[in-house]
Amino acid sequence: MYKVLTRNKIAKIGLDQLDPALFEHSDTEERPDAILVRSADLHGLTLSGPDTLQCIARAGAGVNNIPVDRCSEAGIVVFNTPGANANGVKELALCALLLSARDIAGGIAWAAGLKDAGDAVPGLIEKGKSAFAGPELMGKTLGVIGLGAIGVMVANAARTLGMEVLGFDPYLSVDSAWGLSRGVHRAHGLKQIYAESDYLSLHVPLGPETRGMLNAEVFEHCKPGLRIINLARGDLVQTDDLLSALADGRVARYVTDFPSAALLGHEKVVAIPHLGASTPESEDNCAVMAAKELSDFLLLGHIQNSVNYPNISLEVGEGCARLCVAHRNIPMMVSALSSTLAEAGINIENMVNRSKKDYAYTLLDINTVPNDDLLHTLSKVDGILRTRLIARA
């Protein structure tokens, strides 16, 4: 029986994916095989010692709440759910585009303040409405940085609104490329995006290369009056530099799903309280995908949508056991595995090895269930981070 610790409230439809004959889940499990989490902070998680934890599945795209580097070193696979909440975020991005063009939010707040004006309200509305006017989207240029599941959907939807769209993603996948509208133009680099865009939408993960990517230098070279949509991560934008750019008009409006204290109440900032994936459909989709990733990994050793280990699968064969080995991506690892098994008189029926940057994963179907001594020997091989046995009836 596999034990799953749930952090945050996980949608029931996701938990229903876990066969009750094989899995039990609770929010109090102290020695889990897996963790299902949404936004709870796991950085204080203890990963050393005789921990049973094999994987963490994040019901969402971002994994900033998970200590990915420490998990990688401990051989713990971290999953996310790319694309599961894409439609919900796309719809909010379209709303954000409209909110950035006209001061709709400011106008609504102003109109609410006229409540006690009685019969004078219609006249006051007509007199004051011009303060909240703004341009139409049709014919304007939208720059989309990051063409993953969400970025592609936003780019395609903007085309249907009559916008010109420039897209940039140096890591554009084949699947994303197939889904991208032919009307979306590929930018040659970020400088082109900044120079030509009337609107800018960010859809990139937060990391060392992207933290503060919108800063004073960028604002100096962007098209004057740029309107920025940031539903990705707040720290992609350098706040002090943004405030300066808003003050001198280089940036006309900033719409963010990750507001900070410095931005709240600013007349040119629309602060949304992290609603990107806050739809029942998104929460259900993320929970289902995360639960399936977790289940396939624990039952079969398969990895799909991991942020730290490679995608890998191996058709179930005739071997009576499967070894799942997380290790460093260094030479001679497969040789070390096979020779250790051979010395123990164990034959490899089938095997697959995949790597992702500094880490790799190997699945081996073998003809004998190894004893604990052999598993211990394997775990001591230099470069091996974790071994796990899946025995078959």
Image: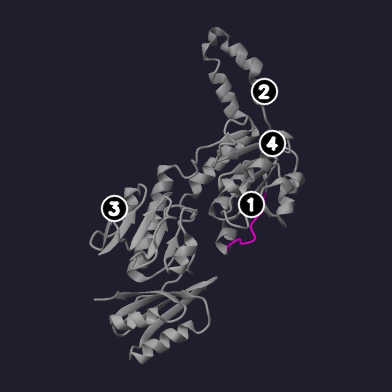
**Residue bearing mark 1:** 145
218 with respect to 332 (left or right): right
Q: Nearer the viewer, mark 2 or mark 4?
A: 4
Graded by Cα atoms within 10 Å as few (under 14), some (14 to 19) or many (20 or more), the crowding at tag 1 reads many
Could you say where residue 145 lies in the image, as x and y percent from the top left? 63, 52
Return the residue nearer the eye: 342 or 89. Answer: 342
Measure the alpha-carbon separation of dots 2 and 4.
17 Å
Q: Are marks 1 and 2 in contact (CB under 8 Å)?
A: no
**Residue bearing mark 3:** 28
Res 180 → quadrant: bottom right
Q: Are marks 2 and 4 in contact (CB under 8 Å)?
A: no
Q: Nearer the viewer, mark 1 or mark 4?
A: 4
Magenta region: 166-173
Does dot 4 land on a helix, a strand or a loop?
helix
Amino acid carrying label 1: it is: Ile
Residue at image location 43% in from the left, 49% down from the top: 39
Residue 131 bears which disc, if any? 2
- Answer with mark 2 or mark 4, whichever residue precedes in sequence: 2
Does dot 2 land on a helix, a strand or a loop?
helix
Specify whether residue 370 is in view. Answer: no
Amino acid carrying label 2: it is: Ala
Residue at image location 48% in from the left, 68% down from the top: 309
- Answer with mark 1 or mark 2, whichever residue precedes in sequence: 2
